[in-house]
Image (cartoon, rainbow, N blue to C red):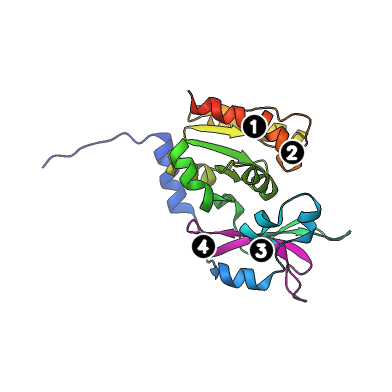
Amino acid sequence: MIFIWRIISKSDLHFINNISNKPEKHITYISRNQIRSSLEIPSKYYIDRGYSSSILKEYDVGLCTRTGAPMYNRIVVPIYDENHKYMVGCTARATVEGQTPKWLHSKGFDADSYLYNYWKAKDYIKESGTVILVEGPGDVWKLEENGIHNSVAMFGTYLSESQKDLLDILGTMSLVVLTDNDEAGKMGAETIFHQCNKTYRIYLPKHSSFNDIGDMDRDAITSDIKPIIENIKNL
């Protein structure tokens, strides 16, 4: 009988521990059709902020008007499974003064285990090997509106190990980190660099004088963001 011994690396050990230590998730899967029928889509709030109705319809972004619902009078942003069939959770934005918190996740949703837009971006990421990391859904919508389809949002400035695992599965080679232009965003980008620079090529471009990608117009994205992506393709 022959035994083959293999030294387990730190990354292997992390992966094994991740599997064994993660509690079982209990997720109520709701179909996309159910979500679309329960919201006022598209969200007027985001149309007034400059987003197109077509992108909001594409991502099923709408107002919850059901009195007594946890997300009542909030703009609901559904998060779907990787097949884009079922909602695994949602996040919702406050719309009126005094409504706290500003963003509210649905009960039981583990944001650290998901990336917003993964269901759509995954094929583009596999093809290009490049991921654009942004903070929130609005940043994704703005890039999508301008023909950039390989962005995912972290629900903040922090890239969890579970989220990083999702990128590894897709064969990611390059990360373009486009966190916000505030102190938290800059610190988040620096943390991601130190976390990932041994695994991926990391790009930390400055995006002009805009606070975040969601505030950028078509001209700014064309001049500031698209050339970076083209340069990565040519490497």
Q: Quadrant of the N terminus?
A: top left
Q: Earlier in the sequence, mark 1 or mark 4?
A: 4
Residue pointed to by mark 3: 106
In the image, residue 66 lies in the stretch drawn in magenta: yes
Q: In this rendering, is residue 133 above or below 30?
A: above
Residue pointed to by mark 1: 225
Residue pointed to by mark 4: 25
**Which range of residues does the magenta coloring cover?**
62-90
Tell me the mark number nearer the camera, choosing from 3 and 2. Answer: 2
182 relative position to 2: left or right: right
Looking at the rendered structure, the kind of residue marked 2 is: Met
Q: Residue at x 64, y 32 (%)?
A: 225
Measure the C-alpha gap from mark 1 to mark 2.
10 Å
Q: Position of residue 234 (x, y in %)?
A: 49, 24
Measure the C-alpha gap from mark 3 to mark 4.
14 Å
Residue pointed to by mark 2: 216
Q: Position of residue 233 (x, y in %)?
A: 49, 28
Measure the C-alpha gap from mark 1 to mark 4.
37 Å
Measure the C-alpha gap from mark 3 to mark 2.
28 Å
Q: Residue at x 69, y 69 (%)?
A: 39
